[in-house]
């Protein structure tokens, strides 16, 4: 596995950014860089099982199933990916599942002076996907920024 890490500065509070990350509607918006129609099934509470899935071109729901190892509002989330899921069936043992697991994602939200928030992301992925994931994360950060701006312009809550 290859470890990637990125940091992006947002003009918002950690509390507001946290809601953008974990709210189902907002999640579907900012994760389109990885996969159109992405969603999660479950919740972001510590100890929870959560699936990150999308529907493919032939109607199969596929993705990863994971465990939320740590979840401390509004400062960090640590997720361990444990396997793949295909139409609700968990796969721990196939060559494809072994390629992607065990893996993790760690999000840290840090308040910065002036009402800003640093989003620090670390993720482990198969080495062959490094460039694709780095590009997608940069795009996702831009989508998060757009979503936050839209919510602020409309004076709407984050969820």
Image: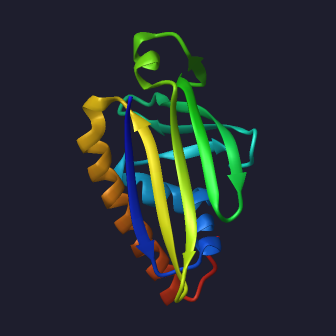
The residue at 43%/53% (across/down) is 31
Which corner quadrant of the image does residue 69 belong to? top right
Give the percent coordinates (x, y) of residue 13: 59, 78
Q: Quadrant of the N terminus?
A: top left
| Whether residue 37 is situated above or below residue 127 in the rendered picture | below
Q: Is residue 90 left or right of residue 96?
A: right
Give the percent coordinates (x, y) of residue 141: 39, 64
Q: Quadrant of the C terminus?
A: bottom right
Residue toward you, 107 or 54: 107
The residue at 38%/59% (across/down) is 140
| Whether residue 14 is situated above or below residue 42 in the rendered picture | below
| Whether residue 155 is situated above or below residue 52 in the rendered picture | below
Q: Is residue 20 visible?
A: no
Q: Is residue 124 visible?
A: yes
Scheme by which the image is coloured: rainbow
Q: Is residue 43 left or right of residue 121?
A: right
Circle count = 0
The residue at 54%/48% (across/down) is 106
Residue toward you, 133 or 36: 133
Give the percent coordinates (x, y) of residue 71: 70, 51
Give the percent coordinates (x, y) of residue 131: 24, 43
Q: Is residue 104 left or right of residue 42?
A: left
């Amino acid at each position: 596995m290859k470890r990637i890490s990125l940091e992006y500065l947002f003009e918002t509070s950690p509390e507001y950014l946290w809601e953008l990350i974990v709210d189902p509607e907002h999640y579907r918006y900012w994760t389109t860089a990885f996969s159109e129609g992405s969603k999660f099934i479950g919740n972001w509470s510590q100890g929870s099982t959560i699936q990150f899935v999308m529907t493919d071109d032939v109607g199969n729901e596929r993705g990863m199933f994971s465990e939320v190892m740590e979840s401390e509002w509004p400062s960090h989330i640590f997720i361990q990916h444990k396997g793949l899921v295909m139409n609700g069936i968990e796969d721990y043992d196939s060559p494809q599942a072994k390629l992607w697991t065990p893996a993790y994602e760690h999000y840290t939200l840090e308040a910065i002076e002036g009402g800003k928030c640093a989003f620090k992301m670390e993720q482990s992925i198969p080495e062959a996907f490094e460039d694709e994931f780095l590009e997608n994360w940069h795009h996702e950060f831009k989508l998060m920024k757009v979503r936050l701006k839209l919510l602020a312009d409309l004076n709407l809550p984050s969820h």
